[in-house]
Image (cartoon, rainbow, N blue to C red):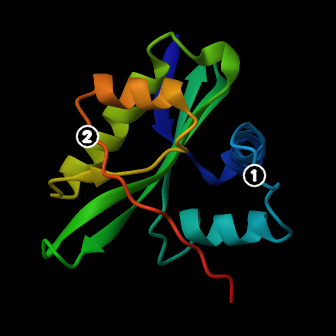
Amino acid sequence: MTVVRTAERADLPVVLQLIVEHAEYERAPSPGPGLPQRLDALLFGPSSRLRCLLAEIDGTAVGYATCSPEISTWDGWEYLHMDCLYLRPQARGHGIGQLLMDAVLHHARQLGMVQVQWQTPTWNEGAIRFYRRLGATAVEKVRFTHTL
């Protein structure tokens, strides 16, 4: 049976493993030291803003999505930013991504938000097809980071 639920503190080790797998899939460096402590505070601390949704099949985690509220200055409203959505390869193509997206959209509605935004690498054609099937539209931009 497939279930999508909010991650709990006891799930942190499996969430961290999924994050490492996600980084490998996206050809990104592995997360650095201190991530468990930072994630614990972001997900479960007194002023936590990040939400993690876990997808499980028969109690085994097969994917996750994370999201947090953000603000659009141009529109003058809050939206939900989905930072990550990842499924292990064996879980793809079985409707589990749809279940995770439904949970993210439900969370946005619960918060009174009218929009969810996210991004995916341009080479990830499977994800792009999936998001377009959901009715999402792409906005072309170049993402920058500046490490301090």
Q: Quadrant of residue 45?
A: bottom right
Amino acid type, residue under disc 2 in the picture: Thr
Report the front residue among 65 and 9.
65
- Residue 7: numbered disc: none
Does 47 sit above or below residue 112? below
- Looking at the rendered structure, the secondary structure element under dot 2 is loop
Q: Residue at x 54, y 71 (%)?
A: 144
Residue behind mark 1: 28
Q: Earlier in the sequence, mark 2 or mark 1?
A: 1
Position of residue 55 in the picture relative to residue 38 (left or right): left
Q: Residue at x 35, y 36 (%)?
A: 103
Looking at the image, do the residues carrying marks 2 and 1 touch, with CB atoms under 8 Å apart?
Answer: no
Residue behind mark 2: 137
Does 61 sit above or below residue 51? above
Amino acid type, residue under disc 1 in the picture: Ala
Does 112 sit above or below residue 53? below
Q: Quadrant location of the C terminus?
A: bottom right
- Residue 141, horizontal then vertical, whole percent: 39, 60
Position of residue 129 in the picture relative to residue 30 (left or right): left
